[in-house]
Amino acid sequence: MYCFRTGKVLNWENPVRFNEKIQRLKLLNNSEHCSTLVDKVGVKEYVTEKLGEGFVIPTIGVYDSFDQIQLADLPNSFVIKTTHDSGTIVVVKNKYDFNSTKARKIISKSLSRNYYWAGREYPYKNVKPRVIVEQYMADKSGGLNDYKFFCFNGEPKYLFYASDRSNPLGMPPKFDFYDMDLKHLPIVCNGHENASKPLDYFPEFDQMKHLAAVLSAGFPHVRVDFYLIDKRVYVGELTFHHDGGFVSFIPDEWDYIFGKSIVLDDLIKQ
């Protein structure tokens, strides 16, 4: 899979690239704790325990199946996700225009699969499939731009900023990387264009850095994602294996530069 997705031979015995080390982490991140943190319910409990109240998007309900959701009890706008995978999401801005048949099909399909098999990411293997309904949130763009911090042993080093996700023309979002001084890095990731305007400094950036350090402490690498809504910071999720370790870095040297920050020695000795 690594060779097919990246076009490179995997150096399993002596990984040096970021993508190579992520493949090792897929097996080394095999604790129950890691499984809890990729669960969309469990991670909220972890964030609240570490940071206190008010840093997670409010949960409306958690269910074992789609049919347990009582539409009449929900607010006009909400979001439906499954707790055990990545990318399954139904955004409902007006429940009176809500196509429940289509939503049921999307959610039920997700509940029937084990996300572990998609990229062999061990933390997902034993997560119980459930449905979570959350409060609908949007920033000034009308959507949710992501501020994703690449952290290494509790130290945030790179910001991955995903913007323009509410493009009315359906164009792909823009991806940009920055260092911790908000200096733009010359990286094109997975073919996504950079934004036309660099991200300016914003006061909440320093708060995000601090929170990312707290949440990532004790992990050789984890990506901590944030949303910024009405000047309030919310934690989105924790991701242990960015893009499954199949990231296309252009220039290629950044695969090595990011890889230097992941230290596997202690985990391998265990």
Image: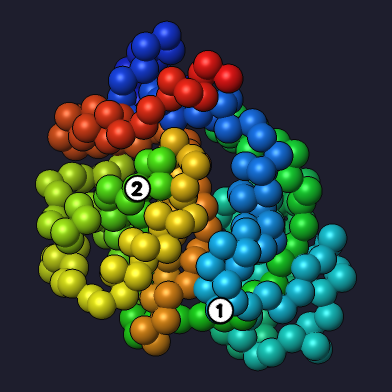
* Secondary element at tag 2: strand
Residue 225 got which mark? none
Residue 98 in percent (x, y) is at 67, 81
Residue at 75%, 39% in the rendered image:
126
Q: Is residue 64 visible?
A: yes
Q: Amino acid at mark 1?
A: Gly
Foreground of the two, 93 or 152: 152
Compared with 56, 142 (above or below) is below
Which amino acid, mark 2? Glu
Percent x, y of residue 32: 71, 39
Q: Is residue 225 above or below residue 19?
A: below
Residue 92 lies in quadrant: bottom right
Label 1, on which residue?
54
Q: Residue at x 79, y 83 (%)?
A: 71
Q: Where, by quadrant of the figure, is residue 65 drawn?
A: bottom right
**Number of callouts in the render?**
2
In the displayed structure, does residue 3 sit left or right of residue 80? Answer: left
Q: Residues within 10 Å of mark 2 (few under 14, many from 20)?
A: many
Camera-side residue of 189 and 221:
221
Q: Is residue 268 left or right of residue 174?
A: right
- In the image, taking residue 77 as reference, residue 68 lies left or right, namely right
Q: Quadrant of the image for the C terminus?
A: top right
Q: Residue at x 31, y 20 (%)?
A: 16
Query: How many neighbours does mark 1 have within 10 angstroms: few (below 14), some (14-19), or many (20 or more)?
Result: few
Lower sequence index among marks 2 and 1: 1
Badge 1 marks a residue whose secondary structure is loop
Return the residue at label 2: 155
> x%, y% of residue 224?
44, 55
Task: Say which quarter of the image contains residue 40.
Answer: bottom right
Residue 101 position within the rendered picture, expressed as x and y whole percent measured from the top left: 75, 69
